[in-house]
Image (cartoon, rainbow, N blue to C red):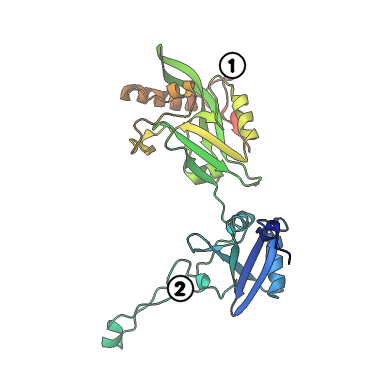
Amino acid sequence: MLKPSKASNRIDKNRMEIKSKLDAEFRRFGLDRSELSSFEEFHNLIEKFHKLNEIPFTICYTDPIHGDLLPINNDDNFARAINSAWPLLRLIIQKKGESCEELNGYGTSGKRKKFLSQYLLPSVVPKGRPHISISLPEDFRQVSSIIDVDVVPETCRRVRLVKHGSDKPLGFYIRDGTSVRVTPHGLEKVPGIFISRLVPGGLAESTGLLAVNDEVLEVNGIEVAGKTLDQVTDMMVANSSNLIITIRPANQSNVGFPRRGSVGHSSQMSHGSQHSNQSLPSDDDHYEEDEIRDHTVSMCQETPEKPSVSEDDGVVTL
């Protein structure tokens, strides 16, 4: 009698087992992880197995760690579901309009409370609030975030803007100017790059993380000190799909200061950027902010004989 070899007892990690449920119907099948690369292919496969031709439906899966019911409706969460499926991926298939989330509202209970007044005063009929149907988001993607809060100095902010392949511009303009910084030799005026304008309705304005007169210190980890406006613009264009900029907000009241556990944290930024982020005394801060505002206003009032940089010269049309 031949003994089974160790190779046959090994579990193929590329093979995934799927168990899907539609009403009282269950389907169980195996699938190679490399066979499906997009949500659309997976959607067509489920449609074929449950015979849901031309019937709109939603796909959810059970998180194997926390047991939460999570949606699968784009390539991002489809890849997350495939990676977390071990050894079994449990799917819940529901026809659109019949899911609990669409009937009762996502994250709410379907039970309604009955008050005692309904029985004591039957003639009084309370007016209920209109029912609002809240369904699962069809395509949810993160567009911005604040990162590295534990390593960036308290007076600065590191912001990530993500376009996800969209052709829509990030929606902000940059300009060059002067900034007062603390150096080993004292206070010095050095060239700097600032945000001059936000496009109404653009991505940068909608995030609320960028503002006019914010100083740009780094672009994707590269320090902008000593670089021209055109060089910084090229850096932003090259990294437009996943732009990470470190800024010093002009309005320091919006920056969380001090932060818990911030003592002893060292910045990952370069040595020159750390000097540029040190705040000055209150009088010097007001002087610096006034200087930036005057520089912005004067650009529209200067005569053509005076060499200056227009706001639109540094437009970032990403």
Dot 2 lies on which element? loop
Name the residue at 48% across, 20% down.
272
Nearer the observer, 264 or 216: 264
Q: Amino acid at mark 2?
A: His
Q: Residue at x 42, y 20 (%)?
A: 181
Residue 311 falls in which quadrant of the image? Answer: top right
Q: Disc 1 designates what residue?
A: 305
Left-right relation of 70 to 78: left
Q: Residue at x 66, y 58 (%)?
A: 10
Disc 1 marks a residue whose amino acid type is: Glu
Q: Is residue 216 above or below residue 122?
A: above
Element type at mark 1? loop
Q: Position of residue 135 (x, y in %)?
A: 53, 67
Q: Is residue 29 above or below residue 79?
A: below
Circle 2 residues within 10 Å: few <14, some 14–19, many ≥20: few
The answer, for residue 121, to whether it is visible in the render is: no
Between marks 1 and 2, how big is the CA–CA gap?
Answer: 65 Å
Query: Could you tell me which quadrant the N terminus lies in?
Result: bottom right
Q: Residue at x 56, y 76 (%)?
A: 98
The x and y percentages for residue 267 are 44, 29
Where residue 312 sits: x, y (%)? 59, 31
Most distant residue in the top direction:
185
Q: Residue furthest front?
A: 1
Query: Label 2, on which residue?
Result: 131
Residue 185, relative to residue 14: is it above or below? above
